[in-house]
Amino acid sequence: MKKIRHTEQQLIERCLNGKKAAQRSLYDLYLGQLMTVCRRYARDDMEAEDFLQEGFIKVFKNLKNFRGEGSLYGWIKTIMVHTALRQIKKRMSFEDAADVYYLSSDPSVLSKLNAEDIIQTIQQLPEGYKMIFNLYHIEGYSHKEIGELLQIGESTSRSQLSKARKILKAQITDQENVTL
């Protein structure tokens, strides 16, 4: 059986008309990319799946509000990030973050690590640091935008990012020392 490719607008219209197959198509279309986004904020895959599920519920509930300004993927990604942030904020406080390590590292260390090592190291950051690190470096938000999203000051965002970088630097140095 040959699959018919729908334009984005047609897919949205079919979803809005309650067509389950269209909703499944939309879900499948962005599943991989959005799961990667959710994993950046989650403690584990199970939590990432929860973020994804809750995010898609919001997507389908609010799809009628998509105005077509920008990409559909970008709109959905924003919903996923906001969903993850709301869930994380419920269970953490920036003041509860772990102690910071103040070690120096060789700048060439990072180039010796593979992408999986770097991702795993970022995942080990305390939640507040990881969230701000991801929002700033991965998602491209400014400190002002992060502050508005998380209802914190810009200076708190900068401070948390600085501490996250120091921890990452220390962890990467430790990893390099173990492999020597």
Image (spheres, rainbow, N blue to C red):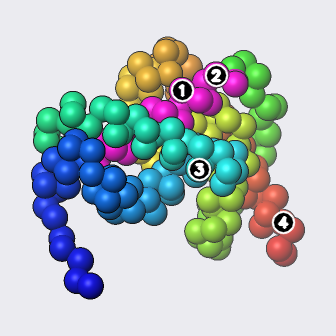
Sooner in the amino-acid sequence: mark 4 or mark 2: 2
Residue linked to disc 3: 49
**In the depicted view, which residue is nearer to us: 140 or 106?**
140
Residue at screen point 79% across, 32% down: 98
Q: Secondary structure at mark 2?
A: helix
Sooner in the amino-acid sequence: mark 1 or mark 4: 1
Q: With 51 as the anchor, is 127 left or right in this view?
A: right
Bounds of the magenta segment: 72-92
Q: Secondary structure at mark 1?
A: helix
Query: Which numbered mark, 1 or 4, is in the foreground of this view?
Result: 1
Q: Secondary structure at mark 4?
A: helix
**Rendered image: mark on residue 90:** 2
Sooner in the amino-acid sequence: mark 3 or mark 2: 3
Residue at screen point 67% across, 50% down: 46
Q: Is residue 39 magenta?
A: no
**What separation in Å lies between label 3 and label 4 (alpha carbons)?**
34 Å
**How many labels sit on residues?**
4
**In the depicted view, which residue is nearer to us: 66 or 169?**
66
From the top left corner, tell me how far across and down residue 7 is, in percent.
13, 61
* CB atoms of marks 2 and 1 within 8 Å: yes
Residue linked to disc 1: 86
Q: Classify mark 1: residues with Cα within 10 Å, few (<14), some (14-19) or many (20+).
A: some
Quarter of the figure with residue 10: bottom left
